[in-house]
Amino acid sequence: MKRIAEKFADLRARNEKALIVYLTAGDPSLDVTKKLIFALEKSGVDILEIGVPFSDPTADGPVIQAAAQRSLKAGTTLEGVLKMVAKVRKVSNIPIVLFGYFNPLFAYGVEKFAQAARNAGVDGVLVVDLPYEEARELRDYTDAVGIDFISLIAPTTDKERLSKIVSKASGFLYYISITGITGTAAPKISNIKVEIEKIRKITKLPVAVGFGISKPAQAREIGRFADGVVIGSAVVRLIDINKNHSDLFKILSDYIRNIKKELRQ
């Protein structure tokens, strides 16, 4: 069983929901990102999304856009991110999803990327600007090496398109709780519940909900009907605010523990 599937199965057996956390790789440095990964794992994070910085992150809000710019300014590259993941994988079995945009992968070479990602220990990829109609350009290569292709489902996704996306997805489905960019609005819980119920009628894949989630109460409510919650901007903001603080790891760990507590039912 793949690491992502194994994680969701383990959580289901313990009646827990997944806490998935996003980090921008290289903000403030790749060495700090590696240390943050270990701290987050110890604090209860179940799956990590590692953002590959890109100069034009159109789906991201101002917090993650700024983090990507800081990371690029610090010299972060896709090659560097993969090397960092390989170092993490030597001592940790936490599922890791690379999150980003197609341009850096295309520039690197999609087949070369898939092989390098597998060798580094990457478990899944999520490419936000690669629509279903074009996804095969990457998915054929990730499927061939056993990397899960994580697909996005939006509130505007109709039934026909949903069926097509689900038929080729693996790992889990990422439901976008709001239309727009990350970290800019709070999701409406009742609307999400209705949409998740529609998705469950056509697939047994786990469904995680992201965009706009930052508070324990939100995680608790969404965890009642989803398989996991994704927190990104709130974590990236905490890291930026406290990056020069000696208690950065404690501050972040306390925040994560408070969220995870609400996902244990």
Image (tube, rainbow, N blue to C red):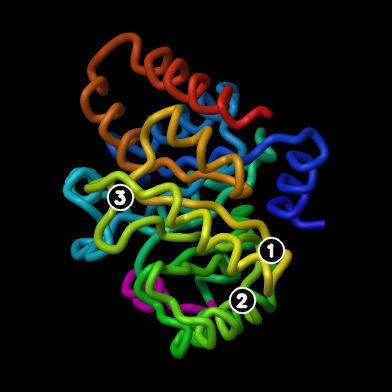
- The residue that appears at 35% across and 33% down in the rendered structure is 235
Residue wearing tag 1: 205
User: Left or right: 183 with respect to 111?
Assistant: left
CA distance for labels 1 and 3: 33 Å
Structural crowding at the residue carrying mark 3, measured as other residues with C-alpha within 10 Å and reported as few (<14), some (14–19) or many (≥20) = many
Q: Which mark is residue 87?
A: none
* Residue 235 in magenta stretch: no
- The residue that appears at 30% across and 55% down in the rendered structure is 53
- Amino acid type of the residue tagged 2 in the rendering: Val
Q: Which residues are magenta?
A: 102-111
Majority SS type along the magenta span: helix
Structural crowding at the residue carrying mark 2, measured as other residues with C-alpha within 10 Å and reported as few (<14), some (14–19) or many (≥20) = many
Q: Position of residue 46 (x, y in %)?
A: 61, 38
Residue wearing tag 2: 166
Circles 1 and 3: CB distance less than 8 Å?
no
Q: Position of residue 211 (x, y in %)?
A: 36, 51
